[in-house]
Amino acid sequence: MIWKHFFYFNKREQHGILILIVLVAGIFIGKFILSDTNDNEVEVRDESLEFVEHKNADTLNGAVRDIDAPIKKNRPYHFDPNEANIETFIDLGLSEKTGKNIISYRQKGGRFYKAEDFRKIYGLSAEQAALLIPYIQIEGKGTKKKQSTFANNKPLDSKKAASLDTETVLANKDMEPRSAKRTFEKQEKYALGIKVDINAADTSELKKIPGIGQSFAQRIIKYRQVLGGFYDISQIKEVYGMEEQYEKIMPWLEISVNTIEPLKINSLSLDRLKSHPYINFYQAKAIVELRKKKGRLNSLSDLRLLEEFGDKDFERLAYYFSFE
């Protein structure tokens, strides 16, 4: 019916109606196209945002893994995997888990008969194996000793020399005497009943305590230095990795409280205060600010009004604070 009436209009009116229809149709089509494009853009943006979030998460996780993972730059040295303890393996650059795998392997009756056997350890990377195998020296049962053609480097008699070529004889002549068997110097350990003052002992003394190797000894010394000394044996558990060893080594430990280095809180800078393991940045800042107001701090009671400190803080810091 609409088109029937359409033909009653003159040509000018018909052209106007057609143009209007085209414009209306164009508006609807354009709206549909723009709507579809916006949906696609939103979808692309959502996908891009999701990709960026995953990428950032991966980067952050990677950073955390890098921070947690110990960076070992220790230079490798000769060791016997049948005798070394877990501290030695850690000192050589292996993770604690890999070191425990080696100890577990030995406890179950496993043994390394040649250096290449070291590759069978679960958790040991090919790179670590390639680095450490040249330093492996195995002693004890089941090992084969390599002997020189010239036993004990004794001079050759004329009959034996005649049976060998000239090059071999000359090589024997220039050969330096070498012992047939290499010996390992085992770390001497203290018997039960001997006490070690952990506020005064050096690394060589600490290593004589069963359960403490080179790495643990160095960590104890370093923590003692930043702490200012130990006032209680249980503080050893605060040293990284020592909590698991604590019950084992405790019978050999003793301390001398009077060797603690005091913290002179009336004169130390903010940086020096916050470097102490028991004082964080906000606590150090609060001390400095209170010092500015009061002029001088006379006792722990001056600090008890500070919200940055709790009862546990005062318990520990009472051994270190000096108000001179």
Image (cartoon, helix red, strand yellow):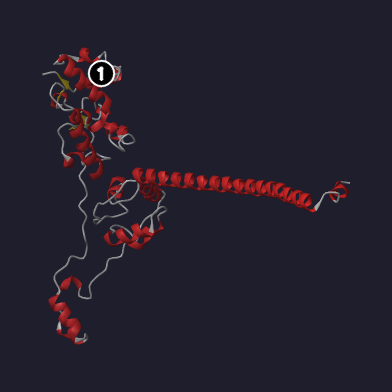
Q: Is residue 152 above or below residue 19?
A: below
What residue sits 17% from the left and 70% below the top? 152
242 or 52: nearer the eye? 52
- Mark 1: which secondary structure? helix
What residue sits 74% from the left and 49% below the top? 16
Q: Amino acid at mark 1?
A: Phe
Q: Position of residue 280 (x, y in %)?
A: 27, 28
62 or 116: nearer the eye? 62
Q: Quick one: quadrant of the C terminus?
A: top left
Q: Is residue 213 visible?
A: no
261 or 266: nearer the eye? 266
Mark 1, residue position = 314
Q: Is residue 1 left or right of residue 96?
A: right
**Badge 1 density bin: few <14, some 14–19, many ≥20, Cα 10 Å:** some
Q: Position of residue 14 (x, y in %)?
A: 79, 51
Quarter of the image for residue 283 reads: top left
Q: Position of residue 19 (x, y in %)?
A: 72, 51
